[in-house]
Amino acid sequence: MFNVLRNEAAPISLENRQSYSGEDVWDALSRVFNKKCYICETKEPSDINVEHFEPHRGDPDKKFDWDNLYFSCGRCNNIKLARYDELIDCCDPSIDVLRAIKHVPPVTPYAKSLRIEPQLEDEKTKLTAELIEKVFNSTHTPNKTVSASFLRKRVFQQFNLFLDLQRDYFDELTLSAEKETTIERMKLLINSSSQYSAFISWCVLDDDELAPLLNDFIGF
Ligand SMILES: [Zn+2]
């Protein structure tokens, strides 16, 4: 999960309370969420939803509240349903959602599962980690089993980009100027605009040499 900076005013179409999914809402959400699902971090997923973070249950104040509209892929939205209402809020600037939940990437493309670990003891963090874990590892239905496998493979592909950079960086023949370029490239992977940035950020956070160099670029 990554922190979202909701730095845009409420789209005009929400004012008349006819629809919460007008074109201007889609465009604004796409920009604010970096075209990513806020739960699985897939960029430009084929099926994307305008989601109510807090279910509106018919309440127009929640239904058309810009701050309550989130961008999630159809798959995550379906897994979340009503069971996962009390999540940590990636749009709340007082919560470092990235460091709250450890994301460990799969080490092979067809790994059977990957690890998601809450770093805090509160119920919201634990429930959010449980949801993310289910998104990536679900074997609940044959459909979910296959789609989770696809998802883990996509995470691995991103992790593989990081492995290439890591190998370059730690190669004893790498020149200092090349190392600097490699660090700049790592910054791209950990930036919240990149997909699966939480997984790559945690690879960096767990490395004693890379963490001090990149810590300031992780998260917000
Ligand atoms: Zn998703």
Image (cartoon, rainbow, N blue to C red):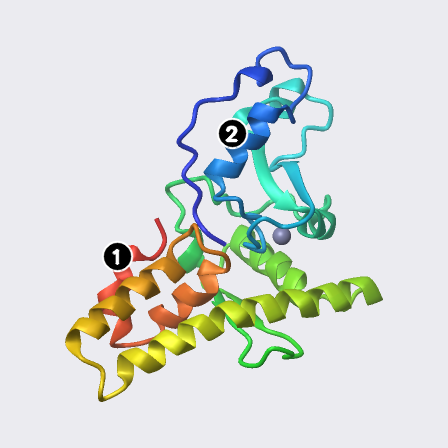
In this view, the residue in front, 183 or 111, is: 183
Would you place residue 170 above or below residue 1 in this image?
below
Question: x%, y% of residue 198?
Answer: 45, 60
Side (left or right) of 43 relative to 136: left
Other-residue count near label 1 (Cα within 10 Å), few / some / many at <14 / 14–19 / ≥20: few
Name of the residue lying farthest toward the left: 176
**Type of residue at label 2?**
Asp
Side (left or right) of 12 relative to 190: right
Question: x%, y% of residue 81?
Answer: 73, 45
Name of the residue lying farthest toward the right: 142
Side (left or right) of 171 relative to 85: left
Label whose residue precedes the other's in the sequence (2 or 1) = 2
Q: Secondary structure at mark 1?
A: helix
Q: Secondary structure at mark 2?
A: helix
In this view, the residue in front, 115 or 8, is: 8
**Type of residue at label 1?**
Asp
Other-residue count near label 2 (Cα within 10 Å), few / some / many at <14 / 14–19 / ≥20: some
Residue at 43% in and 50% down: 193
Question: x%, y% of residue 109?
Answer: 60, 77
- Residue hosting label 1: 216
Q: How far apart, in angstroms, are the residues tagged by discs 2 and 1?
A: 27 Å
Name of the residue lying farthest toward the top: 16
The quadrant in which residue 72 appears is top right
Would you place residue 64 above or below residue 220 in this image?
above
Question: x%, y% of residue 102?
Answer: 47, 65
Side (left or right) of 51 relative to 32: right
- Residue hosting label 2: 67
Q: Is residue 120 visible?
A: no
